[in-house]
Image (spheres, coloured by chain):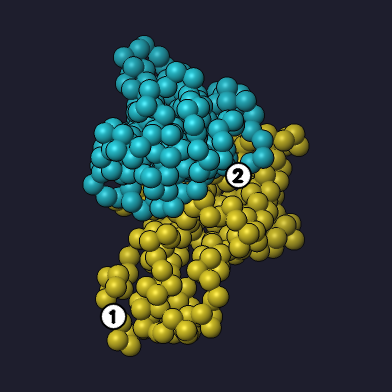
Chain colours: A cyan, B yellow
Amino acid sequence: MSSAPSVGRPRSGARRLPAGTAREEILDAAAELFSERGYAATSTRMIAEMVGVRQASLYYHFSTKEQILAELLESTVRPSLTYAEQLAQQALSPADALQALVRYDVGILLGARWNVGILYALPEIATEPFTRFRAEREQLRSAYRRLVAAVAGTPTADVTGDLVFGMVESVIGMRRDLPALPPPDQLGQSVADAALRLAGSPR
Amino acid sequence: MSSAPSVGRPRSGARRLPAGTAREEILDAAAELFSERGYAATSTRMIAEMVGVRQASLYYHFSTKEQILAELLESTVRPSLTYAEQLAQQALSPADALQALVRYDVGILLGARWNVGILYALPEIATEPFTRFRAEREQLRSAYRRLVAAVAGTPTADVTGDLVFGMVESVIGMRRDLPALPPPDQLGQSVADAALRLAGSPR
């Protein structure tokens, strides 16, 4: 997955990211620690140590641990949300738009260096610092609902949109639990095809 | 969801469960605290206080907090696994068996008093006390894979079985994130129908 040294080892100047700013390196170290050791078990001191900066430098960029987590979580949904808005401007069939969104979203969830999505289940997410993340994730869910309803040709509200959304997010668990996954492009296409079947499209 | 008093309020003899043993009441209180406050933020002392027993009594039943969590997690997969084994003894079509398993599994995940499934994402789950839970969950995943392959008529390994498994488990997130859900029976049937479409059955 990465050649980063094990947790707690002093970095002595090694860069985590080829061309990362201090801010990006803090986010990357936090993503590794949160997803591998757990959010509660990780302190800002540990993050600063892993990057090789003082805690004061970390606090210059992020005032709280929550703020780091919020930014990481937002990075798992905002690109797909932006992409869904771009798709809505294009003259695509609902089926093509749904497939494109699923492929893109799966790419975001599998392409990140660390599997930050597993942190969606933290109870902390219900609190204030995560209001924007929750709102953006619900907007993405709504985009799926709209596309699925358009593909199915049924304007009535049902749970199929939510099931497609849940199935797409389930690649987070697959990435953690399965010893091997198909290449991201191939898995993205499989999930996109599955989304069409789920939505009831004959294709 | 329940009329249990808020966290930390002394119980003074009130029973959490109409006819629960001390062991069941400890599990129920732990399920509430773990799922609502978080696993790391919950101590065995808090669990004992909520039930209204001494910590020594708790340790008589469970030697560690991990052991409590392991038992709670196993209770979310073992009934469905047992049910899948019973289904395999019956002369059902693959489509009927898949639908029955999905309906049952959704019922287990939605019917529990507390939404313990959101704890699947804890990094602690990778450690030794959770070996049996992980093994049983993988057996349940395998049961889905077999049924989905039988419905699809394709013996070749692909990810569709995993996607059905992930879609079924996504009701855990729906239960947490959505303001209202259809009744469990109705949602179970919707997910069962969705599983057949996903598996590629014409029904």
Q: Residue at x 40, y 78 (%)?
A: B48
Task: Sort mark 2 into few (<14), some (14-19) or many (20+) by Cα contacts within 10 Å.
Answer: few
- Specify the quadrant of the image occupied by residue B77: bottom right
Residue occupied by mark 1: B10
Q: Residue at x 41, y 63 (%)?
A: B34
- Mark 1 residue element: loop
Q: How many labels does the image show?
A: 2
Task: Sort mark 1 into few (<14), some (14-19) or many (20+) by Cα contacts within 10 Å.
Answer: few
- Compared with residue A88, is residue B98 higher up or lower down, i.e. above or below? below
What chain does badge 2 belong to? Answer: A
Q: Residue B134: x and y, percent?
A: 62, 55
Q: Which residue is drawn at 54% across and 62% down?
A: B73
* Residue type, numbered disc 2: Asp
Residue occupied by mark 2: A177
Q: Is residue B10 left or right of residue B77?
A: left
Q: Are circles 1 and 2 on residues that touch, CB within 8 Å?
A: no
* Residue type, numbered disc 1: Pro
User: What separation in Å lies between label 1 and label 2 (alpha carbons)?
Assistant: 39 Å
Q: Residue A79: x and y, percent?
A: 37, 25
What chain does badge 1 belong to? Answer: B
Q: In this view, does B142 lie to the left or right of A172?
A: right
Residue B19 appears anywhere in the view: yes
Q: Residue B95: x and y, percent?
A: 64, 46
- Specify the quadrant of the image occupied by residue B197: top right
- Mark 2 residue element: helix
Q: Which mark is residue A20?
A: none
Q: Is residue B202 left or right of residue A32?
A: right
- Compared with residue A10, is residue B34 higher up or lower down, i.e. above or below? below
- Compared with residue A184, is residue B23 higher up or lower down, i.e. above or below? below
